[in-house]
Image: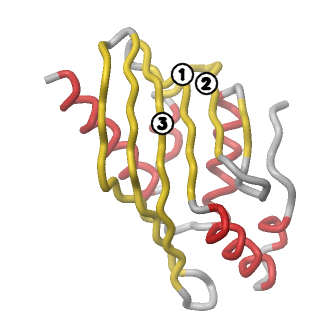
Amino acid sequence: MYHTIVKSIVRSGYRQISSGDFDSLLTRFAPDIHFTFSGQHAMAGDFHSRETVRQWFARVNRFFPHLQIEAERIVVSGMPWNTWVAAQFTVRETLPDGSTYQNHGTQFMRIVWGKVVEDHLIEDTQTLVETLRCLADQGLKEAAEPALRDG
């Protein structure tokens, strides 16, 4: 039963991202969250504070203001004091030039007593980097900037 509840919460988090409700989502994160997004690009990062993750979500929203994320598979293991979640997901967005961005990724989270303490995201980096390059070419210069940093 507990694992079913966690899966529902993860799906709800994806719906919050899709609707741009990042503040509600961030209440589920521990203040000292360890959050990573793999790669060497404007969306990459290795953060250790909820505030930097908030800035990251704001940046993602500037790149992909109508991003839709859908869970393909979610696996939950553990108990409330040490829960691990693995998810496969698909993201989609219509870009300013009318083309479609679609990517697949994986997420690994650790939840302790209802708070996400670790969240690690990996998408197909080549697809993402090519899309960020296109966004920069279309005038969104921030898409070509380096990754955000803590502090």
Q: Position of residue 87 (x, y in %)?
A: 38, 44
Viewer-nearest of discs 3 and 1 = 3
- Measure how far apart labels 2 and 1 are at the Cα level: 5 Å
Q: Classify residue 81 as left or right of residue 49.
A: left
Q: Which residue was labeled with disc 3?
A: 108
Q: Amino acid at mark 2?
A: Ile
- Among the two numbered marks 3 and 1 on one chain, the one whose residue lies closer to the N terminus: 3
Give the camera-side residue of 78 and 6. Answer: 78
- Residue 92, horizontal then vertical, whole percent: 46, 70
Secondary structure type for disc 2: strand
The mark tally for this picture is 3
- Amino acid type, residue under disc 3 in the picture: Phe
Given the image, on which type of amino acid does mark 1 rest? Val
Badge 1 is on which residue? 117
Residue at 65% across, 62% down: 125
SS at badge 1: strand
Q: Are marks 2 and 1 in contact (CB under 8 Å)?
A: yes
Residue 135 in percent (x, y) is at 72, 77
Of labels 2 and 3, earlier in sequence is 2
Classify 10 Å Cα crowding around label 1: few (below 14), some (14-19), many (20 and above). Answer: many
Identify the residue at image location x=83%, y=39%. Answer: 149
The mark closer to the camera, 2 or 3, is: 3
Point 55% across, 90% down: residue: 98
How far apart are the alpha carbons under marks 2 and 3?
13 Å
Label ID, residue 33: 2
